[in-house]
């Protein structure tokens, strides 16, 4: 049903008589998921595909490859998104958000989670650039946690611009 809804929403928002009128014609649609069925559907119908955040960097690269393969001729027309839900640049020992998301996971698995961004600002920038260059992610979101000061967070964002 989601596929049908996406098609209908795109059609309605692309209609020049829709109220309120869309600023972008057609407006981009983002779909997030982790499983094969959802990502295959998103690859065929979304403009932006967000990959669910659990797993390793290798898992994220595999998911990105799967999406682009499923997109076929659309591969160059879609963008990929990823979220770092635990940013721990000043206190790499902090895994508080990941413990909330995966309370039964062991520390080693949490430390290998792609969604954890820790280490130095320089290392974090290198990692984001690697995901962008090798796995073709172009949208990133960062959840600022108490383990990263605003000053450090600003340095990260400035370095990525």
Image (tube, helix red, strand yellow):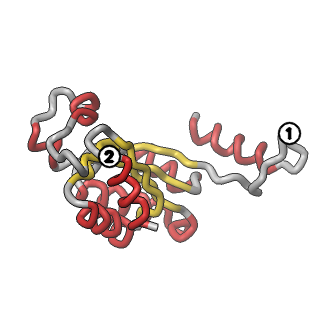
Q: Is mark 2 on a helix, strand or loop?
A: loop
Q: Is mark 1 on a helix, strand or loop?
A: loop
Q: Residue at x 9, y 43 (%)?
A: 108
Classify 10 Å Cα crowding around label 1: few (below 14), some (14-19), many (20 and above): few
Q: In this view, does 144 lie above or below 99?
A: below
Residue placed farthest to the front in the image? 151
Q: Horizontal and vertical percent for residue 141?
A: 43, 50
- Real-space Cα distance between discs 2 and 1? 42 Å
Judging depth in this view, the residue of 102 and 90 nearest the camera is 90
Please name which of the two marks, 2 or 1, marks the residue nearer to the observer: 2
Q: Horizontal and vertical percent for residue 145?
A: 32, 39
Which residue is label 2 attached to? Answer: 149
Would residue 30 be visible to someone looking at this image?
yes
Q: Residue at x 29, y 46 (%)?
A: 148
Q: Horizontal and vertical percent for residue 35?
A: 36, 43
Judging depth in this view, the residue of 36 and 63 nearest the camera is 63
């Amino acid at each position: 049903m989601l596929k049908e809804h996406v098609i209908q929403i795109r059609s309605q928002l692309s209609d020049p008589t829709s109220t309120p009128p869309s600023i972008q014609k057609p407006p981009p649609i983002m779909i997030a998921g982790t499983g094969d069925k959802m990502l295959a559907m998103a690859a065929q119908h979304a403009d932006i595909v967000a990959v669910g955040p659990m797993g390793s960097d290798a898992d994220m690269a595999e998911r990105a490859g799967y999406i682009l393969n499923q997109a076929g001729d659309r591969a160059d027309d879609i963008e990929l998104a990823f979220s770092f839900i635990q940013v721990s640049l000043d206190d790499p020992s902090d895994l508080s958000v990941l413990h909330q998301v995966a309370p039964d996971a062991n520390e080693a698995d949490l430390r290998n989670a792609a969604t954890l961004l820790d280490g130095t600002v320089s290392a974090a920038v290198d990692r984001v650039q690697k995901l962008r260059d090798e796995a073709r992610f172009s949208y990133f979101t960062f959840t600022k946690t108490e383990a990263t000061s605003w000053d450090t967070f600003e340095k990260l964002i400035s370095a990525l611009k």
